[in-house]
Amino acid sequence: MLLQVSWVRHRDIHLLTVGRYTYTSDQRFRAIHHPHTEDWSLQIKYPQHRDSGIYECQISTTPHMSHFVHLNVIEPSTEIIGAPDLYIESGSTINLTCVVKDSPEPPAYIFWNHNNAIISYDSPRGGVSVITEKGDTTTSFLLIQNARPSDSGQYTCNPSNAKSKSVTVHVLNGEYPAAMQRAGQPHHRTPLNHPLLVLASALVSSLLCSIGMLRLPSPSGFPRNCATPYFTPRRTERALPYR
């Protein structure tokens, strides 16, 4: 017996797909089924916040079986610790910390700019280095030794998969505001977040429904959820300073 799979969006009780046919004018939605498998996916291109909510996968059995998936669409965010202004003592080390959160995968790269120019780590100035720690939360540290007045200005952190963020650095001689960052001052760490189910805003999100899994009764009596959390292994990249 050939079973038919349908996807329904609960927000407006909208029938999205039946089999491989799509019943919505929104061309971002389509059903995907690989021959000789029991897996049916609802693909959503360019997911938006309004796509969040409950989606139901219905199987054409008698009585019909259902599987519910809760989709939470979030957007990666960027933060520079201490922004919008940092006051640095001349001769100390500038330590700028950029944190990228709520991303389904670490950014492929993070560029730092100083007054709209990409920072070169092999410039004649020397003493400039970047340490990037990738994981569920990615942190990039820009270190500039022996701060001088010419190092003042706007610094921008540019992740590949999130919006940029800026901070204005003031290198001072003989003035000591309360917010001054001093050499050797420990940087702040942002606690890692491990949400139960988060699909971050990306090019494509897919909701999976497996007929095989739906045939198995749930011990708790509630519908099974095929979705699993997405966690990225932590890894560290270092760019050594040039002197």
Image (tube, helix red, strand yellow):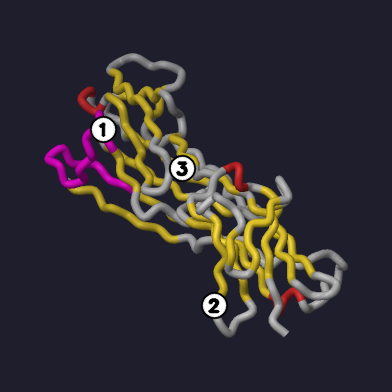
Real-space Cα separation, disc 1 to disc 3, in angstroms: 18 Å
Q: Nearer the viewer, residue 153 or 92?
A: 153
Q: Nearer the viewer, residue 221 or 177?
A: 221
Residue that numbered label 3 is attached to: 99
Percent x, y of residue 2 = 69, 81
Q: Nearer the viewer, residue 164 or 199?
A: 199
The amino acid on which the numbered mark 3 sits, given as a three-letter code, is Val
Using a 10 Å C-alpha cutoff, classify the residue at mark 3 as few (fewer than 14 neighbours), some (14 to 19) or many (20 or more). Answer: many
Real-space Cα separation, disc 1 to disc 2, in angstroms: 49 Å
Real-space Cα separation, disc 2 to disc 3, in angstroms: 39 Å
Query: Magenta span has 122?
Result: yes
Q: Point out which mark residue 34 bears.
A: 2
* Image position of 96 (left or right of 128): right
Residue that numbered label 1 is attached to: 114
What residue is at 40 percent from the left and 58 percent from the top? 236
Q: Are marks 2 and 3 in contact (CB under 8 Å)?
A: no
Percent x, y of residue 211 = 70, 76
* Image position of 51 (left or right of 176): right
What residue is at 60 percent from the left and 81 percent from the top? 37
The amino acid on which the numbered mark 1 sits, given as a three-letter code, is His
Task: Say what secondary structure mark 2 lies in.
Answer: loop
Q: Earlier in the sequence, mark 1 or mark 2?
A: 2
Q: How many marks?
A: 3
Provide the residue span drawn in magenta. 113-130
Using a 10 Å C-alpha cutoff, classify the residue at mark 2 as few (fewer than 14 neighbours), some (14 to 19) or many (20 or more). Answer: few
Q: Nearer the viewer, residue 148 or 161?
A: 161
Labels 2, 3: front one: 2
